[in-house]
Image (cartoon, rainbow, N blue to C red):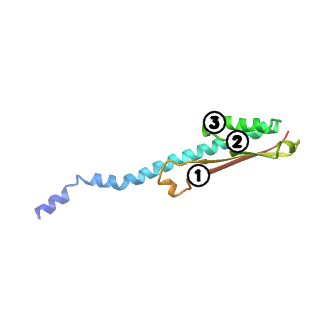
Amino acid sequence: MHFIRKLIKNKQGQALVELALVLPILLMLVMGTVEFGRIFHSYLLITNATREGARAGIVGLDDTAIKTKVKEVSVSLGLTDSQISIEPGQSSRVRGVPLTVRVNYSIGLITPIVDAVVPNPFPLTASTTMRIE
């Protein structure tokens, strides 16, 4: 009986057990927040890049200059020409016609557990349409 009372009063391992139960949940929340931040940052970059590319295109620049502008704005993503599409083609652009610049980008996830919930790599698409001046 004395042993049971001593065992009930001794709570030295309680904090360790609680930490072991709560730590995985906290780590998942933190890593999920980091992944969300990376995805959102990339989305903002490609959205801004399409806006800058469309602006360059409506003032008369050619496809090469538009793609260069898009890549300059989003240099940290390392976009390639195949990820950037421009409609209509250079020969079909006349004043008043809408010009659309679209970027398709996939961001690789760094947290192994998050990729069980969302696809890895995570696909992002942004487009901007402006009327040619």
Q: CA distance from mark 2 to mark 3?
A: 13 Å
Residue 106, compared with residue 58, is above or below; it is: below
Residue 114, compared with residue 82, is above or below; it is: below
Q: Secondary structure at mark 3?
A: helix
- State which mark lies toward you, 2 or 3: 2
Q: Residue type at mark 2?
A: Asp
Q: Earlier in the sequence, mark 2 or mark 3?
A: 3
Quarter location, residue 50 = top right
Tell me the number on the disc at residue 81.
2
- Residue 129 is left or right of residue 43, and the answer is right
Pick the front one: 69 or 23: 69
- Residue 7 is left or right of residue 53, and the answer is left
Residue in the picture at 64% in, 43% down: 44
Residue in the picture at 65% in, 38% down: 74
Label 1, residues with CA under 10 Å away: few <14, some 14-19, many ≥20? few
Q: Secondary structure at mark 2?
A: helix
Q: Residue type at mark 1?
A: Phe
Q: CA distance from mark 1 to mark 3?
A: 19 Å
Question: Where does the C terminus fall, quadrant-wise?
Answer: top right
Tell me the number on the disc at residue 122.
1
Residue that sits furthest to the right in the current view = 95
Q: CA distance from mark 2 to mark 1?
A: 19 Å
- State which mark lies toward you, 2 or 1: 2
Tell me the number on the disc at residue 75.
3
Where does the image place residue 102, in percent across and percent down from the top left? 72, 46
Residue 31, compared with residue 117, is above or below; it is: above
**Residues under numbered marks 2 and 3 in contact, where contact means CB atoms less than 8 Å apart:** no
Label 3, residues with CA under 10 Å away: few <14, some 14-19, many ≥20? few
